[in-house]
Amino acid sequence: MRDYRDTDYMTPFVTDTDVATAAELIEMFGESAGGEAAARAGRSRDLGNHIHFCRWRQIERLIDLLSREQAFGTVH
């Protein structure tokens, strides 16, 4: 899983289904969930499926955000 803490980080664009998928991966793989999402993105890329590649990359980013201990971005 990539560490985005020291870079300008864009919030992922996800759907309700993607959030549910991220939650399932976290439940199944724990701390390795981001790596699993990255592996799935890699498989999609290798198959030439750019739509699923982008979706899995966004899910990987969402998992990173959900695993943070502190708030990220603007807090109101």
Image (spheres, rainbow, N blue to C red):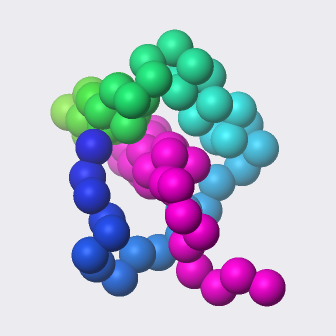
Does 43 sit above or below residue 16? above
Between 25 and 72, the one lying in front of the other is 72
Quarter of the image for the C terminus: give it.
Answer: bottom right
What stretch of residues is rendered in magenta?
A: 47-76
**Residue 45: x %, y % from top left:** 26, 39
Does 39 sit above or below residue 7? above
Residue shown at the point (72%, 49%) measured from the top left: 15
12 sits to left or right of 4: right
Residue furthest to the top in view is: 28
The image quarter containing residue 41 is top left
**Residue 36: x %, y % from top left:** 35, 27
- Can the viewer see residue 76? yes
**Residue 72: x %, y % from top left:** 55, 72
Residue shown at the point (24%, 35%) measured from the top left: 42
Residue furthest to the left in view is: 46
Does 74 sit above or below residue 44? below
Between 69 and 12, the one lying in front of the other is 69
Q: Is residue 64 magenta?
A: yes
Between 36 and 26, the one lying in front of the other is 26
Residue shown at the point (52%, 55%) measured from the top left: 69
Quarter of the image for the N terminus: give it.
Answer: top left
The tally of labels here is 0
The image quarter containing residue 21 is top right
20 sits to left or right of 43: right
**Residue 3: x %, y % from top left:** 27, 58
Residue shown at the point (49%, 54%) measured from the top left: 68
Q: Is residue 61 magenta?
A: yes
- Can the viewer see residue 48? no
Residue furthest to the front in view is: 69
Does 72 sit above or below residue 31? below
Between 68 and 15, the one lying in front of the other is 68
